[in-house]
Image (cartoon, grey):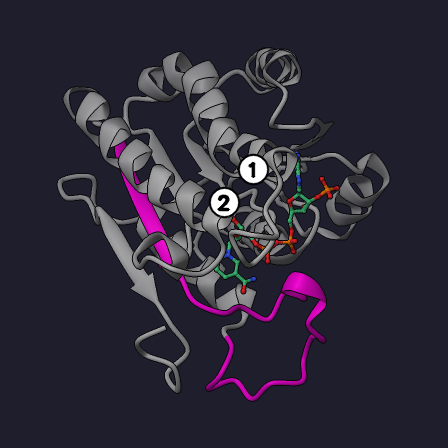
Amino acid sequence: MSKPLKGKVAVVTGASRGLGRAIVAHLAELGADTVLIARDQNLLDEVAAAMKTESGRVLTISCDVSDVEQVKQATAKIVSDMGRVDILVNNVGIPAPRTFEETSISDWDTVIGVNLNAAFYMTHSLWGALIDSGAGYVVNIAGTAGLRGGGSPAYGATKFGLSGLNFAIAAAGKDHNLRSTILYPGGMDTGWRGAPIGVKPASETMSPDEVARFIGNLVTSPTEFVVNEAVLNPIAQPFM
Ligand SMILES: NC(=O)c1ccc[n+]([C@@H]2O[C@H](COP(=O)([O-])OP(=O)(O)OC[C@H]3O[C@@H](n4cnc5c(N)ncnc54)[C@H](OP(=O)(O)O)[C@@H]3O)[C@@H](O)[C@H]2O)c1
């Protein structure tokens, strides 16, 4: 495999499982040095040990990305240890109660913190490094809940909010050659909400590895244009 990301540094939140784990593995295959962020340090270390990297430069950081002080410490360590940041994938997301009646104030605050505030904290804290890269890229992982009303109020609100943040990043970044894309994936085979993995046919759920490959294509695409947003769905559920 060619190594178009050789010498570049990619930071991925929620990298210990699911889509985030698939993204770091693929970006490392493309040659990137990677930074893996999640709360469970042991799991992060297992993921890092299993990764095939050419440079061997993998940094794991235990951080609750909804806590701005932890994010400031983590991002300072990233810049000092890795020296640069070229790609940031704001992937972290947690599910929320499905109905308005079930959603407590505490649920609301937690989900806004993890799914929305964290993306701003991470992007804001790494902004200087992303600009200095000269060709920075921010990928924000939303979900089809960010395109339609209804469904879980807190979850949907965060994914709509990410859409606004994504376009703000694109507007602020354009004069610095910094690109930003928001992805709206439908169902992925990650065990989301405790769903069993590997049970649904491929036409009904997306492999996180395939979605990670799509992200690899985005961040290695020509810098003269930007994919602002993309909706990805299993072929059997094209309008989720
Ligand atoms: N799976 C789907 O069907 C689906 C569909 C549409 C959109 N999405 C979106 O895709 C993204 C990835 O989903 P996924 O299914 O891969 O999720 P997942 O398997 O549940 O993984 C979530 C990751 O986020 C980390 N995390 C959770 N809370 C955190 C916190 N406060 N600080 C730092 N890390 C935290 C987890 O590690 P720790 O617990 O160790 O922190 C884990 O690494 C999310 O934004 C989700 O909303 C998923």
Residue 141 at x, y percent in the picture:
43, 48
Q: Is residue 108 visible?
A: yes
Residue 88 at x, y percent in the picture:
45, 33
Q: Is residue 144 left or right of residue 119?
A: left
What residue is at 68 percent from the left and 28 percent from the top?
64
The quarter in which the C terminus is drawn is bottom left
For numbered disc 2, what is the local secondary structure?
helix
- The single residue placed furthest to the right in the displayed view is 42
Residue 74 at x, y percent in the picture:
64, 18
Disc 1 and disc 2: Cα gap in Å?
5 Å
| Amino acid identity at mark 2 | Ala
Confirm whether the magenta stretch covers residue 183.
yes
What residue is at 79 percent from the left and 46 percent from the top?
49
What residue is at 75 percent from the left and 48 percent from the top?
47
**Callout 1 touching callout 2 (CB < 8 Å):** yes
Q: Kindly identify which residue carries mark 2.
A: 154
Q: Kindly identify which residue carries mark 1.
A: 108
For numbered disc 1, what is the local secondary structure?
helix
Q: For the magenta stretch, what is the residue range?
A: 178-205
Rendered image quadrant of residue 77: top right
Disc 2: residue Cβ within 8 A of ligand 1's nearest atom: no
